Image: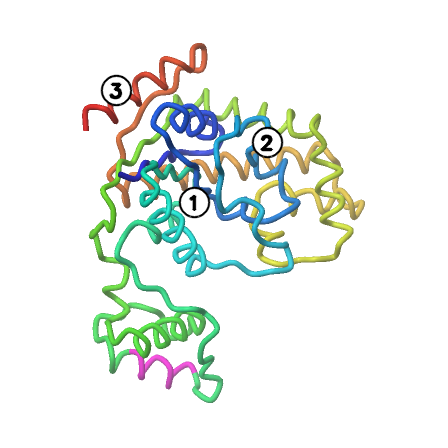
Amino acid sequence: MVIVILGPTCVGKTKLSVELAKKINGEVINADSTQVYKGLDIATAKVTEEEKENIPHHLFDIKDITEDYTVFDYQKDCRLYIDDIIKRGKTPILVGGTGLYIKAALYDYEFINDDNNTYDELSNDELYNKVMSMDKDNTIHKNNRKRLVRALNYMESTKLAYSKKDKTDKLLYDTLFIGLTTDRNILYDRINKRVDIMVNEGLLNEAKKVFDSNIRTKAVLTPIGYKELFPYFEGNASLDSCLDKIKQNSRHYAKRQYTFFNHQLDVKWFNVDFNNFNNTVSDVLDYINNK
């Protein structure tokens, strides 16, 4: 069985994953698209060595920020770890908030590597017509060249209609989706406070190092907590306004996470008892043991 611990940012996913791993002979696999990168630690709330409590953790710190890492790469890597952990008689525990990574790893999705034909010789109209000839149910706008190219590569590679690509509900593993949640006002307050804690833990130094590197890859621009501080380092905005932007973007991201999880995955939600987290651990364990 595969256990997935998901939920919005700042609800205790990391802590629950470690507690469960200790009790059900588990190993943790990262399911956060930003925590695969080395050096992005504080803003991404990456698990620390102390927090790991000697539990094996996988797919953390595997890439430099100059490198690209796609959902296609994650799908391959995560499945290798899942299969290996199960083969050794242990329980894989995916933990993170990147819904597409979770779904790609566990469902019967076929991805193709983006390093394929760019179809530079075709105009947008020609691209669109070619896609439509292969998939009459295609709904991609003809000016969305990037998606048209991706669709065409997918269909050339798999011989399947692109419009059906994300429609599969076939799980490859016996899986339990465990979601952590709390009242919205409590969540937003925790998000705001965590940003302040991150500042005390050295967020500004970490972000300044990223800023000074002049690297502006997806790895740098995707996480919340770095790009929002760039205007401050450039002298174009106050620190307070940039920190407020981090908090605002984090709250908005939490809303998007809820939307994805509720629409895409069969989640059993648990309200977190922040006053006594052991109660939450016990509730989740009871649920797992009764499955």
Residue 228 spot, x, y in % from top left = 65, 43
Write the start and end of the magenta stretch as one range: 124-131
Element type where label 1 sits in the image: loop
**Residue 134, quarter of the rendered image:** bottom left
Q: Is 245 in front, or is 15?
A: 15
Element type where label 2 sits in the image: helix
Residue 286 is labelled as: 3
Give amino acid for label 3.
Answer: Asp
Give amino acid for label 1.
Answer: Thr
Give amino acid for label 2.
Answer: Glu
- At a point 38% along the width and 50% down the height, the residue shown is 100
Q: Which residue is mark 2?
A: 49
- At a point 61% along the width and 29% down the height, the residue shown is 195
Asked whether 114 falls inside the magenta stretch, the response is: no
Residue 234 spot, x, y in % from top left = 79, 48
Label 1: few (<14), some or many (≥20) within 10 Å? some
For marks 3 and 2, give the CA distance: 28 Å
For marks 3 and 1, give the CA distance: 26 Å
Between discs 1 and 2, the one toward the N terminus: 2
Q: Is 153 in front, or is 242?
A: 153
Of badges 3 and 2, the one in the foreground is: 2
